Image (cartoon, grey):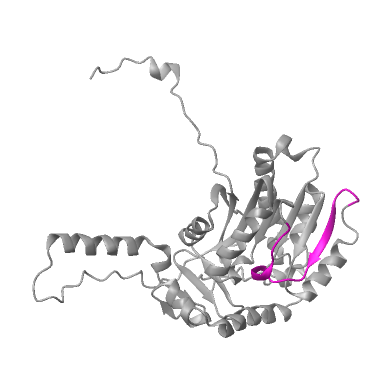
Amino acid sequence: MSFSLYSPFVSTTGHSHSYHPNHIPPPSTTSAFPPSPRQRRRELRSLLIRSLDPMEVCGVDSEGKEFNSAQEMWREAIGEEGDETKKTQWYRDGVSYWEGVEASVDGVLGGYGHVNDADITGSEIFLKTLMQERLVNGGTNQHLVALDCGSGIGRITKNLLIRYFNEVDLLEPVAQFLDAARENLASVGSERHKATNFFCVPLQEFTPAAQRYDVIWVQWCIGHLTDDDFVSFFNRAKGCLKPGGFFVVKENLAHKGFVLDKEDRSITRSNPYFIELFRRCGLHLYQTKDQKGLPEELFAVKMYALTVDTPPKVHRTRSKTRSNRPQIIK
């Protein structure tokens, strides 16, 4: 399962179509008396907090409809909180869309199969750096296991993960994609590097085995999850990482706010939107990297490395040259 690489709000020349920025109304003055300085400060503080909240930034859908906040968009998409019927339909429609897509590299990449090489190259550079820094001895002489979330036809497992991990589990809700993955991976790897488990389960319903994985790779699929299910998934998955393990999230980025794709039932979030959700998950941002080499008409793509443990602080010391310079005595 994947979601559209193509941005409906980017022209073929690469220039974004604009939409109205989030409007912050002036403080209310409906009282017959002017507000006291304390009331004024409280109102301004409330407005400032609202303006900084990524969930309060406006967005659009693929038909050009504007929303004042993510909450407004989700209310329309999945109903009020507790409306499980509409939420279930959201996920059912998303899977139905991908069931109608050809089980090929070009199909799962939305007609952009030619970006496969650039995507894998960028991911490999990022992964190698993280393995050297996070895993003992860079992962050598260890039995390493990865989970490929939204694996589709096994594209990332085949071209990347199976070369670095002894076992890779694939998680994919579209049965025809998972069948293609089994076939594509049947002759790939070896006894020491193989695809082990094929889970035909939606991401929002999956609970990984405790402390099984060194890396959980989530690419071009988390946009199908609602914000609440996004947080729930990572909260469940945190306990499935081995010590030193980490998540890699690689996703499209909206320039601001969000873009809702009504056709495949996915949301493209902005960087601040992602950062806020990671914070709600209790995850720590270890490292990020922008994907390079993709066509201009596509969404920007960013890679996030996330950990459960707090990254160590780097203590910088001044050089002797600097410290021995004449100083002003205060």
Query: Residue 84: x and y, percent?
Result: 57, 81
**What residue span does the magenta drawing correspond to?**
190-209
Identity of the residue drawn at 38% across and 14% down = 324
Q: Is residue 214 visible?
A: yes
Classify the position of the C terminus by image quarter: top left
Q: Is residue 158 above or below residue 319?
A: below
> Residue 118 vs residue 235: left or right?
right
> Residue 180 vs residue 252: left or right?
right
Q: Quick one: 37 or 105, which is closer to the camera?
A: 37
Is residue 83 a member of the stretch shown in magenta? no
Q: Is residue 316 above or below residue 204?
A: above
Q: Quick one: 33 or 174, which is closer to the camera?
A: 33
Number of labels in the image equals 0
Classify the position of the N terminus by image quarter: bottom right
Q: In which image quadrant can residue 149 be found?
A: bottom right
Q: Is residue 9 visible?
A: no
Identity of the residue drawn at 22% across and 69% down = 26
Is residue 205 a member of the stretch shown in magenta? yes
Query: Residue 108: x and y, percent?
Result: 71, 70
Query: Residue 76: x and y, percent?
Result: 48, 82
Identity of the residue drawn at 28% across and 63% down = 46
Q: Quick one: 281 or 190, which is closer to the camera?
A: 281
Query: Residue 45: x and y, percent?
Result: 26, 60
> Residue 296 vs residue 105: left or right?
left
Q: Quick one: 304 or 46, which is closer to the camera?
A: 46
> Residue 106 vs residue 67: left or right?
right
Q: Is residue 167 above or below residue 18?
A: above
